[in-house]
Amino acid sequence: MCSTIAGPRRLFDPSGDNVILQGGFDIACPESTDTTDSPTFTLDDEAPVFDDSDIERCADAGGCTSIVDYAAVTDNCGTPTVDCDPPSGSEFAVGTTTVECSAEDDCGNTSTWDFDVTINPCNVVNIEITLQGNSTTGPDTRCIKTVGDECSDVVHRELLFTDGVFDGQIEIACDDTSNLCVKDEQHTLYETSALTDVGTEYNAAAVTLKAGDTNNDSKVNIFDASWLSATFGDPHDPGGCPWNGDRDADFNNSGTVNAPDHSLMASNWQAKTVCACGAGLTGPDDAEDVKVQVLIGELPTEVGNRVDLVADGVFDHRDVFEFERLNGLPHTLSAAIQATARAQKDRASQNPGTGN
Ligand SMILES: [Ca+2]
Ligand SMILES: [Ca+2]
Ligand SMILES: [Ca+2]
Ligand SMILES: [Ca+2]
């Protein structure tokens, strides 16, 4: 502890390093060491020491400012008085602000310093994303697109998945954001994750991205089935980030388009998703009237040339059935497509004149 020592009672030793006090003192500056005749005190001539590291971070969740507390100042003796402009605990806007501080210890030693506080225009989101059916053991990178409220703040980022799961932090534009819509444009449908503001960060609800959307229209439909059939047995296509438009039906990330990918598409047949802001579906929303067949001429040439196994100029459940038979697959996808076709036929017969 430090204290000012009254003049009449203090004596300086010849070296100038110590203060020799005549007996009877119980407080002094700084710590005392008893001697036979009198306490001896080392003079505190050390100024307070500060952590002058610059601070850089995203804004606090929910906006574009951040409350910043500064590191504590230390001293060899007691707790110094600190004065900063702006003071610790101030709210900082996006940009760089220089903070100027001074400190004084109990013995009048002072120090001054400055450092920069930089707030970047981002908010941190803690999120867990699971890729449905992903069979990869170990780490693997996928290109994930995120979309904020009002379909704003669209970002494509490579995320490292381990055993099909990404569990970590991403940064989004600083804003009051309620939902994050998440998609692997090359492989999956959108899923919406609700954000909870927990102070400095957002916590996002965990999402599982459903496989099967190869053409990025947020529906698992006949076009995706044609691509699965055309590329069955092919190696996966990296596709870049942002997604470069190359299609890849390797949903389970095994390295090739194979039986598990067929199974995933069959289980998600007719699934579709749309973001809370409306982003997602492209083209006509034919959810009530899902296409169950497509003219071969409507398909890309490299696909059309490979999928019309029952050569009749259209791609439908019959071709999928034959594709499944040739590759030893269960007839789950063809059955699903055929069931949709039957349902459409029934609806059309009940509501004549409203069909397509
Ligand atoms: Ca000191
Ligand atoms: Ca699709
Ligand atoms: Ca695969
Ligand atoms: Ca056909």
Image (cartoon, rainbow, N blue to C red):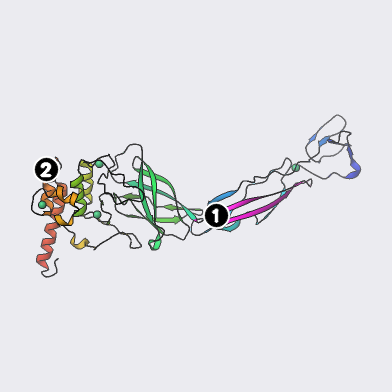
Hey, which residue is sitting farthest bottom in the picture? 353
Q: Residue shown at 58%/49% (left/top)?
A: 55
Query: Would you say 65 lies left or right of 13 here?
Result: left
Quadrant housing the C terminus: bottom left
Q: Which one is in front, 286 or 345?
A: 286
Quadrant location of residue 262?
Answer: top left
- Magenta span contains residue 117: yes
Say which residue appears at 14% left-offset and 54% top-offset.
296
- Give the SS element for disc 1: strand
Q: As drawn, is 343 to the left or to the right of 214? A: left
Distance between the alpha carbons at the discs numbered 2 and 1 = 59 Å
Q: Amino acid at mark 2?
A: Arg
Dominant SS in magenta: strand
The magenta region covers 94-121
Give x and y (percent) for residue 310.
Answer: 8, 49
The residue positioned 20% from the left and 45% from the top of the image is 231
* Visible residue check, residue 295: no
Which circle's residue, 2 or 1, is located before the other in the chain? 1
